[in-house]
């Protein structure tokens, strides 16, 4: 798993490392990483490095110093470099001196727009991880003039580093070079960060336990259940799906099919859409009622079951079976309106809640807000459950405070029925025996991969996402070392 650390933890680690490192060494190491990637971007976007024009937007402090030192390194590659100093009196002195020695220009703030308009690349060194809030007017005005690719130093200026929130003017970077550790902004607002390039400056031993985690392909491949020579349909996990209705059978078909596609050993469907599910997926053992569905290793409950007394009875029955339950859609609304239904649950039985923002607000009484990590952590603690908060970047929290982040792969999953597919995937992984926190994270990863593969650059339906699940699993396994 990749670790992600809050800015407070990164600053503390940097302070410890700075205490035993020669003055300026860390900054030059970081700046060299910026310069290397800047040269790569020039080659890709402008066709060459030498003779190209780079403009540095330089704020106060160390972030501006990183940009200035990067400019000095670029000058050695024959790049024309001009620095626009937003606060000349607070510019990093050593970095500024290095740029001037290398033959870089320092241009007045008033002349910044004309230099920006002729740039082949702009380096954003306006603010660093200590900054809060949007860009100030002078910086915002310069950023509005940018048409060239933008390389951000550590994070895009104006984006909140620990939440990824944007509340006003902010940089939208083509790429971001970050140092020592990934920060929350890099996974919570990937659209603003662009490609994230990691530069190791030696912080590893100083960081401690990460605040957030992200699964990589190796984690997904290792966790994905694969049958062995002694397995049978029961040992691979029996997934129960209680979803849909006679009038609205789509949720039932999608959730049950996702469990099948996730190679569940057996899928039992229980509900009024039994005939439709059986017609589409004859391998599903379908019955009209959850009360005679037979034994399962996990239940998926909620999509399309309704929020009346019948849906409530279905949820209560599933919660009382002593197996993990993935509660989605209507089940979440039932819990929000009638929280006493959770009394049917054995406290030791895992519960996984999968709300989108609207359902989260119904469930907790307030919207997730800009600090989605804090919100999902609190919800997991409050309900003693794993909570998967859907969104552009999906968050999975457990009651102990662990949080997984599934970085977005585009907006392809913003389509009707996509959540039903995710529920079926999650239920199958729960039935296989994966712990709920990991099951939810792996399901979110495969769901996102399937959405990207199904789309291939154009919007795709939930049925398309469903069909791409096997390819998504193969992709994760092929990328694992």
Image (tube, rainbow, N blue to C red):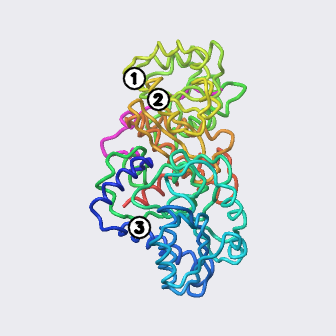
Residue at disc 3, secondary structure: helix
Q: Is residue 243 magenta?
A: yes
Q: Residue at x 59, y 34 (%)?
A: 368
Q: Disc number at residue 227?
A: none
The majority secondary structure of the magenta stretch comes to: loop
Q: Residue at x 59, y 74 (%)?
A: 83
| 202 or 328, nearer to the observer | 202
Q: Is residue 131 above or below residue 290?
A: below
- Can residue 51 be seen here? The reply is yes
- Tell us which disc is closer to us: 3 or 2: 3
Q: Position of residue 274 (x, y in %)?
A: 61, 27
- Residue highlighted by disc 3: 27
N-term-proximal mark, 3 vs 1 = 3
The residue that label 1 is drawn on is 349
Cα–Cα span, label 3 and label 1: 50 Å
Q: Nearer the viewer, residue 22 or 301?
A: 22
Tell me whether the residue at label 2 lies in contact with that at label 1, contact meaning CB atoms closer than 8 angstroms: no
Residue range (magenta):
224-244
Measure the alpha-carbon separation of dots 2 and 1.
14 Å
Q: Residue furthest left?
A: 20
In the picture, residue 195 is in which quadrant?
bottom right
Q: Measured along the vertical axis of the image, is residue 466 above or below residue 22?
A: above
| Image-based side of 342 in relation to 209, left or right | right
**Distance between mark 3 and mark 2 Cα atoms:** 39 Å
Residue marked by disc 2: 380
**Viewer-nearest of labels 3 and 1?**
3
Which quarter of the figure is the C terminus placed in? bottom left
């Amino acid at each position: 798993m990749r670790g992600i650390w809050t800015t407070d933890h990164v600053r503390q680690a940097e302070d410890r490392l700075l205490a035993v490192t020669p003055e300026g060494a860390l900054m030059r190491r970081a700046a060299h990483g910026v310069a290397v990637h800047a040269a790569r971007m020039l080659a890709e976007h402008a066709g060459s490095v030498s003779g190209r024009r780079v403009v540095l937007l330089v704020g106060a402090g160390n972030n501006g110093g990183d940009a200035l030192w990067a400019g000095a390194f670029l000058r050695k590659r024959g790049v024309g470099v001009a620095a626009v100093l937003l606060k000349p009196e607070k510019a990093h002195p050593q970095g500024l001196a290095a740029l001037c020695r290398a033959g870089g220009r320092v241009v007045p703030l008033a002349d910044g727009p004309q230099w920006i308009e002729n740039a082949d690349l702009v380096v954003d060194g306006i603010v660093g991880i200590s900054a809060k809030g949007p860009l100030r007017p002078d910086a915002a005005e310069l950023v509005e003039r940018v048409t060239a690719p933008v390389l951000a130093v550590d994070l895009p200026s104006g984006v909140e580093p620990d939440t990824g929130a944007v509340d006003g003017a902010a940089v939208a970077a083509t790429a971001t070079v970050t140092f020592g550790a990934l920060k929350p902004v890099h996974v919570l607002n990937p659209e603003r960060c662009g490609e994230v390039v990691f530069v190791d400056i030696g912080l590893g031993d100083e960081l401690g336990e990460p605040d957030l985690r992200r699964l990589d392909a190796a984690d997904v491949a290792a966790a994905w259940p694969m049958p062995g020579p002694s397995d049978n349909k029961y040992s691979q996990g029996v997934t129960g799906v209680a979803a849909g209705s006679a009038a609205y059978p789509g949720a039932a078909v999608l959730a049950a099919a996702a469990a099948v596609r996730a190679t569940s050993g057996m899928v039992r469907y229980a509900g009024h859409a039994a005939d439709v599910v059986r017609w589409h997926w004859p391998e599903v053992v379908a019955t009209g009622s959850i009360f005679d569905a037979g034994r399962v290793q996990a239940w998926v409950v909620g999509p399309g079951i309704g929020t009346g007394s019948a849906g409530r009875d279905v949820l209560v029955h599933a919660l009382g079976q002593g197996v993990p339950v993935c509660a989605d859609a209507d089940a979440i609304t039932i819990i929000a309106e009638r929280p006493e239904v959770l009394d049917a649950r054995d406290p030791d039985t895992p519960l996984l809640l999968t709300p989108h923002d609207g359902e989260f607000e119904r469930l907790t009484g307030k919207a997730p807000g800009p600090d989605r990590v804090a919100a999902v952590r609190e919800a997991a603690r409050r309900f003693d459950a794993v909570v998967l908060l859907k969104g552009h970047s999906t968050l999975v929290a457990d009651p102990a405070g662990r949080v997984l982040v599934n970085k977005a792969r585009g907006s392809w999953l913003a389509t009707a029925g996509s959540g039903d597919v995710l529920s079926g995937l999650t239920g199958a992984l729960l039935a296989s025996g994966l712990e709920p926190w990991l099951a939810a994270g792996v399901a979110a990863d495969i769901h996102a991969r399937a959405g990207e593969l199904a789309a291939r650059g154009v919007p795709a339906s939930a049925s398309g996402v469903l069909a791409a699940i096997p390819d998504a699993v193969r992709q994760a396994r092929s990328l694992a070392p």
